[in-house]
Amino acid sequence: MLYIEEVLNIMGGVPKQRKTKSRRNQRRMHIWARAPVLAKCPKCGKPVFPHTVCPNCGYYKGVEVIDVLKKLTKKERKKREKEMKAKEKRESLKKEKPLTWEELSKK
Ligand SMILES: [Zn+2]
């Protein structure tokens, strides 16, 4: 008949000594939840996981992969379309206004 210690010895390593709280806590010192690394979507500017399709606009590498509007209800779709249009308008306004050399020299 086997004793429990012998069984454990056969199965694998058995701790010889109890680890103190200090030892245990030192071991676990490096275990903590890290904040996720997020990139910025170049299309809509929302934070997204890198190498992932943007869940907000459905774009990846400048190509529309998912039709985001398909899943929404009619009301939500209208709202989203409005937001996207407003965003595009703002961006186009930004792009139209690079200062010329004359304007820069005036400033
Ligand atoms: Zn996006």
Image: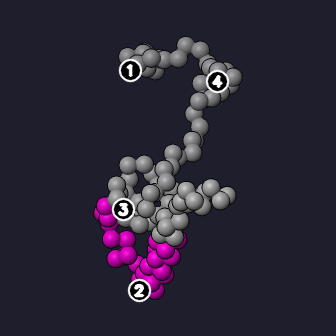
Compared with residue 81, is residue 66 higher up or lower down, i.e. above or below?
above
Would you say the beta carbon of the disc 3 residue lies within 8 angstroms of ligand 1? yes
In contact (CB < 8 Å): disc 4 and disc 3 = no
Dot 3, crowdedness within 10 Å: few (<14), some or many (≥20)?
Answer: many
Would you say the beta carbon of the disc 2 residue lies within 8 angstroms of ligand 1? no
Report which residue position mark 1 lands on. 11
Residue segment shown in magenta: 63-91
- Confirm whether residue 75 shows in the render: yes
Would you say the beta carbon of the disc 1 residue lies within 8 angstroms of ligand 1? no
The residue mark sitting in front, 3 or 2, is: 3
Q: Nearer the viewer, residue 90 or 96?
A: 96
Q: Earlier in the sequence, mark 4 or mark 3?
A: 4
Q: CA distance from mark 4 to mark 2?
A: 55 Å
Q: Which mark is residue 26?
A: 4
The residue mark sitting in front, 4 or 3, is: 3
Q: Earlier in the sequence, mark 2 or mark 1?
A: 1
Q: Give the quadrant of residue 18.
A: top right
Compared with residue 8, is residue 63 higher up or lower down, i.e. above or below?
below
